[in-house]
Amino acid sequence: MHATVWRGGAIIDIDDGSPYRSRAVALNELGQVVFVKWGPQSGTYVWDDPTVTALPASFWSPSAINLLGQVTGTHAVGGYARAVIWDASGITDLGTLSEGLTSRALELNDRGQVVGYGKDGSGKYRAFFRDGGAPTDLGVLGGTGSYSRSEANLVNELGQVVGKSTTDANNSHGFVWQNGAMTDLGSLGNSSIPRDLNDRGQVVGYYEAMVDGEQKHRAILWETLRQATPEEEIAILTEAVNDLVNSGDLDAGHAQTLLAKLDDADKKLEKGDIDAAVKKLEDFIEKVEKLVLREDLSPEDGELLIDAARSAIDQLLA
């Protein structure tokens, strides 16, 4: 078993030549891959074709890599598991919750915000969010004794956090944490588990329900998170355009034209000129439509950009 990447219709063995097992863990929009190896060279590595970089030996459980090439995960400190970020400058220990000894990082966004879980001073597992400084305890929906626990699994570019937590009924429910508060996402059955989160605040996952006397899983979509503001939509659009360039799906020259329109719209908003901001966003949509017609941009990517721009316009005109 070897760590591999599928690219351009072909499978690439990124641990080529090794007789030992390896496994890919995560990748970012630039195609950089975090993988782990077993055997004499066991450890965590980052593959950035064609370069392979070994992370410090104490970094034994990676979980994610962002657009900046930062890797988050868990390493060993004095016999305890600790959440960390690694980048070109080295490893940064993210700390623990109040009086706790252990923490684990599960996800990070392109702003370097990290989520995961750790033990607090009473030995309870609690979800955390870290945006520089010490991690923030996100609390718990409910539960008693050993059934009281939470963990944060997902964070988007808006800083919205999604995870799972016990409830007062001792079920597990998905939650969203934003603006300093944890909200129960609920369930259509007993328990619910969120699996992914996008920058529009949409969450997908599954819930457990009894069907014909058997416990079954059913897919679920939550759209209960707050809508991104026009300013946030523009920031999301800017990042999306840059991602398309980095992935080779959009020419850099065309991207500069789109980015200039978004920058103009943002500046108009800062000045309170709503009509001018709307006009710039409409110009952005028109340019995207032309790129799609000329086949310089895929219809799928074009639709995503247009939908986000229209969402911002709708809010500004409301």
Image (tube, rainbow, N blue to C red):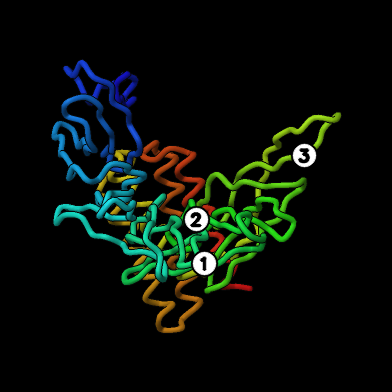
The answer, for residue 66, to whether it is visible in the render is: no
The numbered mark at residue 209 is 3
Q: Earlier in the sequence, mark 1 or mark 3?
A: 1
Residue 37 in percent (x, y) is at: 25, 29
Q: Is residue 139 left or right of residue 112?
A: right
Residue 24 in percent (x, y) is at: 32, 31
Q: CA distance from mark 1 to mark 3?
A: 27 Å
Residue tagged by mark 2? Answer: 152
For the residues bearing labels 2 and 3, Cβ distance under 8 angstroms? no
Q: Residue at (55%, 65%) from the top-left corner?
A: 177
Q: CA distance from mark 2 to mark 1?
A: 8 Å
Q: Secondary structure at mark 1?
A: loop
Q: Earlier in the sequence, mark 2 or mark 3?
A: 2
For the residues bearing labels 2 and 1, Cβ distance under 8 angstroms? yes
Residues packed near mark 1 inside 10 Å, few (<14), some (14 to 19) or many (20 plus):
many
Residue tagged by mark 1? Answer: 138
- What's under tag 2, amino acid-wise? Ala
Q: Is residue 290 left or right of residue 95?
A: right
